[in-house]
Image: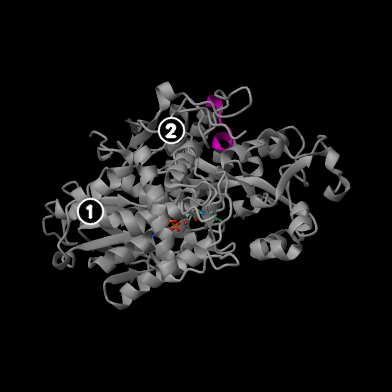
Amino acid sequence: MTLDAKIPGGRLTQKWDRHRFELKLVNPANKRKYNIIVVGTGLAGGSASAALAELGYDVKTFCVQDSPRRAHSIAAQGGINAAKNYPNDGDSIWRLFYDTVKGGDFRAREANVYRLAQISNLIIDHCVAQGIPFARDYGGLLANRSFGGAQVTRTFYARGQTGQQLLLGAYSALSRQVAAGKVKLFSRREMLDLVVVNGQARGIVVRNLINGDIERHDAHAVVLCTGGYGNVFFLSTNAMASNVTAAFRAYKKGAYFANPCFAQIHPTCIPVHGTYQSKLTLMSESLRNDGRVWVPKDPGDKRPPSQIPASERSYFLEEKYPSFGNLVPRDVASRNAKEQCDMGKGVGDTGLAVFLDFADAIKRDTRAVIEKKYGNLFQMYEKITGQDPYQTPMMIYPAVHYTMGGLWVDYNLMSAVDGLFVLGEANFSDHGANRLGASALMQGLADGYFILPYTIGGYLAGTNLPAINADHPAFKEAEQHVQSRLNTLLAVDGKRTVDDFHRKLGSIMWEYCGMARNNEGLEKARSLIQSLRAEFWENVRVPGIDKDFNQSLERAGRVADFLEFGELVIIDALARQESCGGHFNEAFQTDENEARRDDENFCHVAVWEFTGDDKAPRFHQEPLVFENVELTQRSYK
Ligand SMILES: Cc1cc2nc3c(=O)[nH]c(=O)nc-3n(C[C@H](O)[C@H](O)[C@H](O)COP(=O)(O)OP(=O)(O)OC[C@H]3O[C@@H](n4cnc5c(N)ncnc54)[C@H](O)[C@@H]3O)c2cc1C
């Protein structure tokens, strides 16, 4: 199969308009004849379901939580980018496009990123119309704050709860369509297989998580909005239920996985504090608007921060990157924090932390102002650590946060399987090797509200879709496969818990494929994962039965997929013999320890095709062509 990204011709600024005009349309009266499955109810899935139903399609929407409102998107804190240029500080669609391409270290598609920047402004208008309570300035205009990798202030926010407010907006729009009978909602359902008939995605098989029933659902097209796979590292800032299962099962049915090794490590998370911890908590990047990052100048200095005078502190980001200071992109801030800790300057009991200090901001702006901006984040920090960040600096350390890799999609957001569309964090699309802060919400909502509604129409109107239903043999076969996998998991009856395997996998991934990687470590990780996977199928303990509410069984399936997928991540990291963005191979760095790309050999999307269990995946590449920006060594100095 050839990888055709279907990027429209013409000038960059006109591609999307032209494409929308050229896409075939479905007549309004015919839309109700089409039935579309949307899996996921985060910002991508919630917005897609609402927008498709509003157009007149019949939609079936699925999620694993008890309510769509509990999708992981609700956790998003800091904000959403748009090129409105309200502060009049030099922003434009072109600048947002450029910052995003540069931020992703030139490993994203120009055409996709430009479209995203164009749509960013529509998202804000749409959300304001929905009633999202974005922060406003004194005069009533929408307020903005700064995020990493940009020298303009373009992030719209609702205190530290932007994701929650945006999700409530999408949920309201979705609920309107549920009430109108256009969306049928299936909560507490886990998609366990994709059904492909004659090369077209025609349905899914799900498990009812309350009673264990296996259900078949047919459709004319399937849309996956199932989020990111950061939990392959076990400890991450993602929700506990975030997983790779739906995407991985689609990969096994013919969808391709792109850049799986591109994971984002966020610099400002509450450090790990115990062996049996299962979650890491993000302290939003917005805090770096006012917080200053520092460590003691002398390695091993364990004095309390209040006793270390300014002259004995190293504000290492401000010193090394005077132009961007504390607001360098996440990959750069994370690597520098690690470097300081590796030099013995880390703070706290473990030495794996740096300070994020608000003393200067409080002195300058008053506590009341800081509290208004970040009150809920400070409260969260205090609840978890028992320390008051108004009085003493926060301690932070990088943690896995977001995954830029995902299922490969073309410009229409369609995967390598006809009729299977992938949106939001689940696809690989727009962020290249590193995502800039506040751009995930932007992408999820662009995909769901503004892109898919056009492109899926083009597919449906231009495709012959024979009548089938869930009695088709392909559904029966998929259901049997799902059931036999559940039976196998229950039958192992071993001694180690599912979480124990997951924790071990995570520690391998973090140690050998985390903030820094090298070929020797990656090879070791690959063989460790293979052994762990073999042990899993011989020694995992999954209590209970399948026809019941059984969270061990749910998790076992997800961890089994992570154990296979983790190896794919390693294979991808080994294949990319360069450093770029969040992918840092120690062998490829500049004299100043920055990522050194190899544009001659690796200016491409790495795309993997499943060829069979226990067989090596087949490698494809989609070359990245830059006609509008010049590839340079990223500099934030
Ligand atoms: C703590 C935190 C803070 C963040 N803050 C910001 C921010 O300020 N700005 C920003 O731009 N980004 C932020 N991000 C990133 C952003 O929140 C996510 O990238 C984004 O919300 C993902 O949305 P999504 O719709 O793609 O997926 P999700 O919100 O993860 O939704 C996935 C959906 O898929 C469903 N699902 C998954 N698997 C299955 C299955 N097998 N079967 C059925 N359903 C399934 C789930 O039930 C859920 O409904 C943050 C991330 C974290 C972790």
Secondary structure, mark 1, is: helix
Judging from the image, the colouring scheme is one colour
Amino acid on which the number 1 mark rests in the picture = Glu
**Residue at numbered disc 2:** 572
Task: Locate residue 161: give its quadrant.
Answer: bottom right
Badge nearest the viewer, 2 or 1: 2
Q: Which mark is residue 477?
A: 1
Q: Is residue 635 above or below residue 290?
A: above
| Sequence-first disc among 2 and 1 | 1
User: Camera-side residue: 335 or 489?
Assistant: 335
The residue under the point 20% across, 51% down is 459
The residue under the point 38% across, 43% down is 114
Q: Residues within 10 Å of mark 1 (few under 14, many from 20)?
A: few
Q: Position of residue 92 (x, y in %)?
A: 45, 47
Q: Magenta stretch?
A: 512-520
User: Camera-side residue: 407 or 207?
Assistant: 407
User: Camera-side residue: 102 or 269?
Assistant: 102
Q: Is residue 55 left or right of residue 48?
A: left
Q: CA distance from mark 2 to mark 1?
A: 31 Å
Q: Is residue 515 magenta?
A: yes
